[in-house]
Image (cartoon, rainbow, N blue to C red):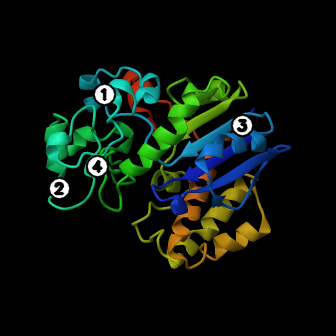
Amino acid sequence: MPPELILHADWGSDPKKRWMCAALLEGDRYHVRSPEPVGDLQTFWDRVRVRAGGGSTLIGFDFPIGLPIAFAKPAGITRFKDWLPLFGKGNWIDFYRLAKTPAEISLRRPFYPLRPGGTKQHDLVEGLGVTSMHDLLRRCERPTEIRGAASSLFWTLGGKQVGRAAIIGWRDLLGPAISDPGLDLKLWPFDGRLIELVAHETIVVSETYPAEACTHLGLQPPGRLWSKTSQAGRKAQAEKLLEWAKKREVRIGGSLIETIEDGFGDRKSAEDPFDALLGLLSMVDVSLGMREEGMPHDYDLRVVEGWILGQKP
């Protein structure tokens, strides 16, 4: 059985840029709800459980979940899920503190820089003892034949950076949730295959990437003939998204259809709810069995680096 609730959260370090979109299984069809703000992180898991009504839940977050093996091995990290609750505590107390200077960068304090001004990615390369920034990309983040590379987890500067958002996701959501015995949270692929995890009627968390999700839905990746930051670019994808929903027999409410056809409006922040929808539809595709989950074969990928749901291994 597919999960009864699928939820995708487009993430950012600014709370205003955190949007989520949900699909509920009603009968044999998913009903997609309009995107909404993620809201208070302290009540997030309680709200998820209420919405799921005790059923199985699959959640996707648009931030990295896992560590590059070139960083993890010298740091002595053998299983990402075991170490995640330890970051920010004890010997790892400085883990989430952004390094101000190159001298402060270390395996126990890998995020850099705190602010712009004279900072270089080469500082991070030297500080973490790797050969190049390529080494600080997990394999699922590297460029493919259909999309470009993602940004390195540890670099925290620029429009494409994901480090600051990952810190919030790990420190304020995933770390505490894994430590909560009453939550029974599982991480894909670290805890096993998706079909087995969902069958236990628990909360399963996975990683998503909207640029990758576009290719799952039959769209060109953003930056190739269209831009997701442009209302015109988003409107140009409406026909394909609604056709995808029709083929999958996924129900989309009338108001959301209008929003999709309008390109989510002309607000500067409209790309965030748009991304929330893209990630959700990709997750629905996997949950319906129309796309492979992408379970990696390599042991290090399954327990250390992680993977993007739906991306080919």
Comes first in the chain, label 1 or label 3:
3
Instruction: Measuring from the top left, give residue 134's x and y in whole percent.
Output: 23, 43
The residue labelled by disc 2 is 119
Residue beneath the point at 55% across and 57% down: 18
Mark 4 vs mark 2, CA separation in Å: 10 Å
Q: Secondary structure at mark 2?
A: loop
The residue labelled by disc 3 is 3
Mark 1 vs mark 3, CA separation in Å: 32 Å
The residue labelled by disc 4 is 155
Q: Disc 1 residue type?
A: Ala
Q: Are marks 4 and 3 in contact (CB under 8 Å)?
A: no
Quadrant placement of the C terminus: top left
Mark 4 vs mark 1, CA separation in Å: 16 Å
Residue beneath the point at 13% across and 40% down: 126
Q: Closer to the camera: disc 2 or disc 3?
A: 2
Q: Disc 3 residue type?
A: Pro
User: Badge 3: few (under 14), some or many (20 or more) residues near its Cα, within 10 Å?
Assistant: many
Q: Is 237 placed above or below 147 here? A: below
Q: Seen in the image, is 126 located left or right of residue 143? A: left
The residue labelled by disc 1 is 72
Instruction: Measuring from the top left, give residue 199's x and y in whole percent.
Output: 71, 26
Residue sitting nearer the eye, 2 or 186: 186
